[in-house]
């Protein structure tokens, strides 16, 4: 499983990355988390608000910090 956290590094983006990593650890899921800060790469996902979360190529969240519960639903736990 591949999870990308899209954002330039703002506090909400950093919080999103932290929550994603915590949710993965709690769920015991094997997933690779990548932080994407390049605005051109972010735009390729059709995302124009950050933070955003992409799970296996599918945009799941834009413009907010998702809850651990939301993330666990996306990763199937």
Image (cartoon, rainbow, N blue to C red):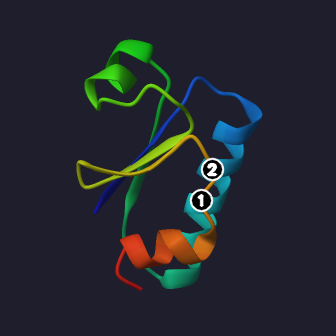
Disc number for residue 40: none
Q: CA distance from mark 2 to mark 1?
A: 7 Å
Judge from the rendering whether residue 3 lies leftward or rightward of residue 63; answer left or right. left
Whether residues under marks 2 and 1 lie with C-beta atoms below 8 angstroms apart, the answer is yes
Q: State the residue in front, 1 or 66.
A: 66
Q: Is residue 77 above or below residue 43?
A: below
Q: Is residue 40 above or below residue 31?
A: above
Q: Which residue is mark 2?
A: 16
Q: State the residue in front, 49 or 73.
A: 49
Q: Which residue is mark 1?
A: 66
On the image, the x and y values in percent for residue 77 come to 42, 86
On the image, the x and y values in percent for residue 68 come to 61, 71
- Residue at 28% x, 63% y: name it: 1
- Residue at 50% x, 83% y: name it: 27
- Residue at 37% x, 64% y: name it: 31
Q: Residue furthest toward the top?
A: 40
On the image, the x and y values in percent for residue 57 come to 23, 48
Judge from the rendering whether residue 38 lies leftward or rightward of residue 10; answer left or right. left
Binning the other alpha carbons within 10 Å of mark 1 as few (below 14), some (14 to 19) or many (20 upward) gives: some
């Amino acid at each position: 499983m591949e999870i990308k956290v899209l954002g330039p590094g703002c506090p909400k983006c950093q919080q999103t990355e932290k929550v994603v990593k915590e949710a993965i650890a709690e769920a015991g899921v094997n997933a690779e988390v990548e932080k994407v800060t390049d605005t051109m790469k972010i735009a390729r996902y059709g995302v124009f608000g950050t933070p955003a979360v992409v799970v296996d190529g599918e945009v799941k969240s834009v413009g907010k910090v998702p809850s651990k519960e939301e993330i666990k639903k996306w990763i199937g736990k």
